[in-house]
Amino acid sequence: MILAALLSLGAASASPSLDLDTLSNQADRVVVGKVLTTQTLRNNENAWTVATVRVSETLRGESAPVIDVRLPGAMLPEQDLTVHGQIQLITGHDVLLFLQGDQLVGMGAGAFVVSDDKAWHGTKHWTYGDPKTLTTDKDEYYVNHEMNEVRSTIR
């Protein structure tokens, strides 16, 4: 069972970007919003990061003004718990999120940075961030979708 979990994590991280149709088919909620805060939560067995997002547009699922998104991994005082293939949602970023419950579809594949009416996603697991900070490398390390394309795919 542990091996199956590791293999599924490896498969998810080896394919950091899924096409819009696949993301849309797997998501029960799709939202556009701004990341307000992130915090680490833990219990006796696990730790995770919760990002609070102010929702500006609900494309699918239950509408709510603010949602919490649970991400595997956390920054703890004694160590960082990193899950390969999982992204971090960065406070202040405008984002497009494909969600199953309170988690991203396909780990990091379900998160995009929204900028200039485009949804940007890194082609490598380490390229999540604001595409405005990458000048000449932007086209090499990012794919993007026009937000109108995203809306029409989901609806």
Image: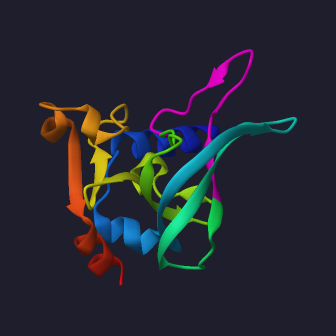
Q: How many marks?
A: 0
Give how far across and how far down residue 149 sits, in percent: 23, 72
The residue sitting at the bottom extreme is 155
- Quadrant of the image occupied by residue 6: top right
> In the rendered view, would you say 78 is above or below 2?
above
The residue sitting at the top extreme is 78
Identify the residue shown where x is 14% and y is 41%: 139
Question: Is 79 covered by the magenta stretch?
Answer: yes
Question: Is 60 covered by the magenta stretch?
Answer: no
Q: Specify whether residue 1 is in view.
A: no
Give how far across and how far down residue 70 sits, in percent: 64, 50
Give how far across and how far down residue 136 sits, in percent: 12, 31
Name the foreground residue: 113 vs 110: 113
Give left or right: position of 144 versus 48: left
The residue sitting at the right extreme is 44
Identify the residue shown where x is 37% and y is 38%: 128
Name the foreground residue: 30 vs 84: 30
Give left or right: position of 80 versus 12: right
Magenta span of residues: 68-86
> In the rendered view, would you say 94 is above or below 126?
below
> In the rendered view, would you say 89 is above or below 99?
above
Identify the residue shown where x is 14% and y is 36%: 140
Give how far across and how far down residue 28 sits, in percent: 53, 74
